[in-house]
Image: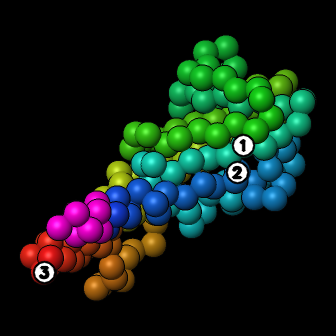
Amino acid sequence: MGLAAALLFLLLAAPAAFAEQYTVGDSSGWTSTGDYQSWVQGKTFTVGDTLLFTYGGSHSVEEVSKSDYDNCNTGNAIKSYSDGNTVITLSNPGAMYFICPTIGHCAGGMKLAINVVAASGNSPSTPSTPGGTTTSPPSTPSGAPSTVNYGFMVALLGAVVGIMC
């Protein structure tokens, strides 16, 4: 019975293992030459995922409001990071905005807008662009698996294993 309980625990904890870490800017990192509007396209950021910002000493990262993002205002940061290797856990659904506060960098495009979806959702991110428009996510094909269906299947499998043991 102990083995069945351990197996059930592992099966139910499995969705947490699927959290992704996104390296902002991929191999280039967080730089003043990055194209973060293009980088975010096609990515789905989910609660539990992390963003990894890697950058040199002339950069840092500030989490800011949408208004401060739109205006490249560095005076009201929600959070500031300057360690060169910043990991930010996406803990709540909703829009998040990041800029580099170095003079001229945000205005030059060193800014990132993402939308974080709840862990049970499977909608791609729809970040706001500096012009205020949004990018429509592609639709999920009919019958495509979702996190909700996956969770149900894991629970069902766990119940079957529990009954068999």
Spatial CA span between label 2 and label 3: 46 Å
Residue beneath disc 1: 53
What distance separates the C-alpha of mark 1 from that of mark 2?
5 Å
Closest to the observer, 101 or 21? 21
Q: Which mark is residue 34?
A: none
Q: Amino acid at mark 1?
A: Phe
Picture coordinates of residue 21, whole percent (x, y) = 60, 54
Residue 80 place in picture, x, y as percent: 66, 23
Q: Which mark is residue 24?
A: 2
The amino acid pointed to by label 2 is Val
Q: Which residue is mark 3?
A: 164
Three-letter amino acid code at disc 3?
Answer: Met
Q: Is residue 159 above or below residue 32?
A: below
Tell me: 55 left or right of 95.
Answer: right
Please report the bounds of the magenta region as a residue range: 1-9
Quarter of the image with the C terminus is bottom left
Quadrant into which the N terminus falls: bottom left
Local secondary structure at mark 1: strand
Q: Is residue 88 above or below residue 74?
A: below
